[in-house]
Image (cartoon, rainbow, N blue to C red):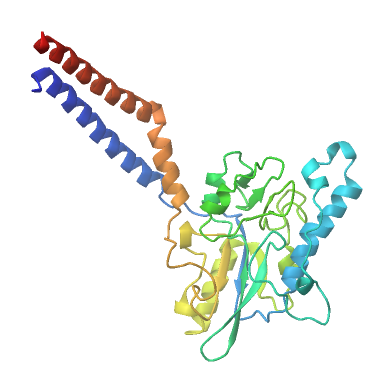
Amino acid sequence: MKTNRRDFLKLAALGAAGAGTAGALTAEAEASSAPAEFGPDVMAKFYDSTKCIGCQSCVVACYNTNFRDRAKYVDEYLPPEEQNFIEKEDLLPKLAPQDEFTPDKPWLNVVTNDYRFRTVIQKYVDENGKPHFIKHNCMHCKKPGCVSACPVSALQKDPVSGIVTYDAGRCVGCRYCQMACPFNIPKFEWSRAVPKIVKCDMCWSTLGKNGVPTETACAKVCPASAVVYGKRSDHLAEAKKRIAENPGKYYNDSVLGETIYGGTDEIYLAAVDYKKLGFPTDKIADYSYAEKSEGLQHTLYKWGIAPIALYTALAIVGYRNNKKHHSDEGEDK
């Protein structure tokens, strides 16, 4: 069937509209993913791997603060009518025998973050046999993938402090946050009947009592000051100062967390490649994928662009097929 002048004009108009829409989507998506500055009161932890002695005091303090103390607080200080069911049933994570905290065992057999540990210390031994320690916990990204992916807003980023918090009462256990995190941080309580997501919230729900904490458990107990807590701007300045004062000491004279994934509220210094220390730096860009995807999605559905374009295209296809069908019937007669 030949296309007549009217059909050609309709298709041309649709193509032009589609091209314009695509251009607008691209422009707005790019604009929405443009990095913004960190606020002046954004909080962060600064970890210098070269100072860490691997004592794992931070791991024990984090466990005690965010599980034992929290359970005690819920049970003893909140009246029954204010106790969240999920928190009330939040039994202490059971540690395996090899992970029990004992004075005569200097190293916990912890491979990575899991539902028991919000923060862990891992060890990497270089080609010269020298050990390097690294601390792994939530990075509190500037534009977190976990927050963007959560369909019920159980994960949220505080607009002032930048801390990524978690509300167990909202969580539906979909685990989208796990898939969206480029650092593989959120962990799921597979062993529980009423499971939750476990991740660092900078002691927001414990030491801060659901507000911006003045300290974190890990920074409070570190005997070597390898991890410190405070404003991100101060930490970043200190990291660059240490690099300037110690040429060649830190890997590539770079600060992990300054730009990766658009920037994070965790600042790191290390003497070896961050990839060897467990960070997939070769797979994470210097922009947030969540920011780009949100820009595209929000533009697609802005003013009903996507549904209107789809229904218009379907209407034209249906019109042409219907017209062709009647034309074929006429020829058969």
Can residue 221 be seen in this snapshot?
no
Residue 98, compared with residue 195, is above or below; it is below
Residue 25, compared with residue 310, is above or below; it is below
- Left of 252 or right of it: where is 109? right
Give the residue displayed 12% in from the left and 9% down from the top.
330
Q: Looking at this rendering, what residue extends furthest in the bottom direction?
A: 128
Q: How many marks?
A: 0
The quarter holding residue 116 reads bottom right
Give the residue displayed 58% in from the left and 62% down from the top.
232
- Left of 90 or right of it: where is 284? left
Can residue 146 be seen in this snapshot?
yes
Give the residue displayed 39% in from the left and 36% down from the top.
299
Q: Position of residue 105 (x, y in %)?
A: 79, 81
- The residue closer to the viewer here, 86 or 257, is 86
Residue 15, compared with residue 225, is above or below; it is above
Q: Position of residue 31 (x, y in %)?
A: 37, 45
- Left of 25 or right of it: where is 260? right
The quarter holding residue 313 reads top left
The N terminus lies in quadrant: top left
Q: Position of residue 277 (x, y in %)?
A: 54, 74
